[in-house]
Image: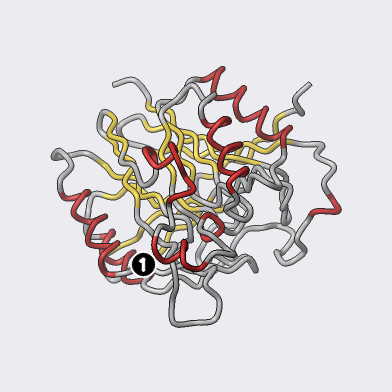
Amino acid sequence: MADTLLFHVSDIHFGLENNEALDWFAAEVDRLRPNAVAITGDLTMRARHHEFRAAEEWIGTLQAPATLDVGNHDMPYFNLIERFVTPYKRFGRLTDIVEREIDLPGIALVPLKTAVRAQPRFNWSKGWVTGRALEDCLARIDALPAGTRALVTVHHPLREVGTQGTAMTRGGSNALAELAQRNVLGVLSGHVHDAFEIMEDTPHGPVRMIGAGTLSQRLRSTPPSFNELRWDGETLQVHIRNLENIEDEAMKIDDVPEDAHPPREEGEPVAPVGAVPRTDPPVS
């Protein structure tokens, strides 16, 4: 079986996007032609109409099928009626790829919704895996052909990952425990703006968690990046693709440790398992 190539990108934040990083990513899609692109939420900055139009135009240029998770920034901020009644209305034609399952030979991208319209805590930006969302995701996984591995796509990491850009996802630990009982290869997420990869233990075994950085100007401790994933039918390799020489110091969010990786626990290797950072030259 030929290798399956996947690109994982997150937190593009149209409205405060980094155009050099977007051009670089699109050029890599055109050059390498991945089998699919997973965009794990926060496509826009404030869910404004013009931000969605710009996002739609850019995604339309990508030479690969895409799936899009909804992030906390992608639901109306200033129109609560619209947020509660028609929260996805502004996605327009992008609705066709929202929470879209992509089935490939031996592997599938399966969405799990973590962004909700409202929740019983002050900070609505945090994640929540509702019972209904988890049931829908598990049903999709259970319906896959025998032997097919699932990569679950979410916006919020399902548990805290050691960065100060927090997730605090309600229901995340339960979701991980349920996923561990199925043929899940890993969970792809965004939200914290820095790439990471860890193995999370659950009562039913470990689950691999893979986070993508950002292609926006809202940098934390690392430059714009995306994840390049290669699946050969047995092993999933993850390469963190960094764009160097980005002069966005004024936009950096200084709430993440410099190394951007989770703190090392006893017995855990110093580097994230399987993650191979790779820095690419700036786009000319």
How is the structure coloured here? Answer: secondary structure
Q: Nearer the viewer, residue 180 or 135?
A: 135
Residue 65 x/y as whole percent? 41, 28
Q: Residue at x 56, y 47 (%)?
A: 43
Whether 162 is drawn above or below 232: the answer is below
Per the image, the residue denoted by label 1 is: 129
Give the secondary structure at mark 1: loop
Question: Which image quarter is the C terminus in?
Answer: top right
Q: What residue type is labelled 1?
A: Val
Residue 96 x/y as whole percent? 36, 38
The single residue placed furthest to the top in the displayed view is 31
Whether 132 is drawn above or below 145: the answer is below
Residue 21 x/y as whole percent? 69, 35
Question: Which image quarter is the N terminus in?
Answer: top left
Left or right of 157? Residue 73 is right
Left or right of 110? Residue 281 is right
Q: In which quarter of the image is residue 66?
A: top left
Q: In which quarter of the image is residue 53?
A: top right
Q: Residue at x 82, y 37 (%)?
A: 245
Q: Residue at x 52, y 31 (%)?
A: 59
Would you call the spot at circle 1 few (<14 residues within 10 Å), some (14-19), or many (20 or more)? many
Q: Nearer the viewer, residue 200 or 49?
A: 49
Q: Quadrant of residue 149?
A: top left
Left or right of 100? Residue 89 is right
Q: Which residue is drawn at 62% across and 43% down?
A: 50
Whether 248 is drawn above or below 35: the answer is below
How many marks can you see?
1
